[in-house]
Amino acid sequence: MPALDDARLYLCTDSRARTGDLDDFLDAVLRNGVDVVQLREKGLEARAEIALLEHFAVAAERHGKLFAVNDRADIARAVRAPILHLGQDDLPVRLAREMVGEDVLIGRSTHSPEQADAARAEAGVAYYACGPTWTTPTKPGRPAAGLGLIDHASSQEGERPWFAIGGIENLARLDEVIAHGARRVVVVRALTEAEDPGAAAAAFRARLS
């Protein structure tokens, strides 16, 4: 399995049903610097989500990268995903670990310094994401945590990887979070809405190398 410690660029994407190009899209971004790709699409039935994740698994293996399941420990177990990502309101890590086993990496979303500190120390957590740095339509109604949360995370000691997330939709904003200490980011629209997703991934990854 590729090492999470080496991951710098993490992408969340839907199934690309509107454009019908999921396989080509996954190949383009994974070939050009995305290290982790997560399927994030609310409202999917379990069977449909499992079928889509088969595409993620094949593409990730082909490029030597990682894929992640969002929220659902049962689905992560069913597809043997290497990563399960949990929000603050999802299953407790302890219960998720019982479902997925010891080999799955578990990530946590955090939205405040207190939550980031907890995720950094919590047993069973492999990485955490801090944000949203800016408000984003992918999380409607959630206020921005701001660059202060990035400052806090970057000031803490510890080897657990963390990612800046939320509204990092262009290179200017990427440069801002890097200036505040981030070395890893999660993106959505920066690649999913790019005219050339592969080129966009390469440009982001170059800044994070």
Image (cartoon, grey):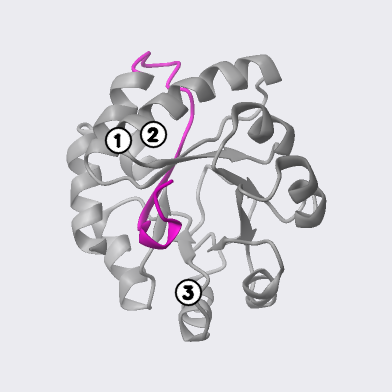
CB atoms at circles 2 and 1 under 8 Å apart?
yes
Of badges 3 and 1, nearer the viewer stands 1
Q: Residue at x 18, y 57 (%)?
A: 206
Q: Which residue is mark 2?
A: 60
Q: Which residue is mark 3?
A: 150
Residue 88 position by quadrant: bottom right
Q: Residue at x 32, y 30 (%)?
A: 62
Could you tell whether 79 is left or right of 59 in the image?
Answer: right
Q: Which residue is mark 1?
A: 63
Q: Observer-nearest residue: 173 or 74?
A: 74
From the viewer's perspective, is residue 206 above or below residue 152?
above
Read off the magenta span.
1-21
- Residue 12 is covered by the magenta coloring: yes
Work out whether residue 140 can be spotted.
no
Point out residue 31 in the picture as x, y percentages from the top left corner: 23, 37
From the viewer's perspective, is residue 82 above or below residue 182?
above
Hey, what amino acid is under mark 3? Ile
Kindly state the secondary structure of the residue where label 2 is placed.
helix
Kindly state the secondary structure of the residue where label 3 is placed.
helix
- Residue 60 is covered by the magenta coloring: no
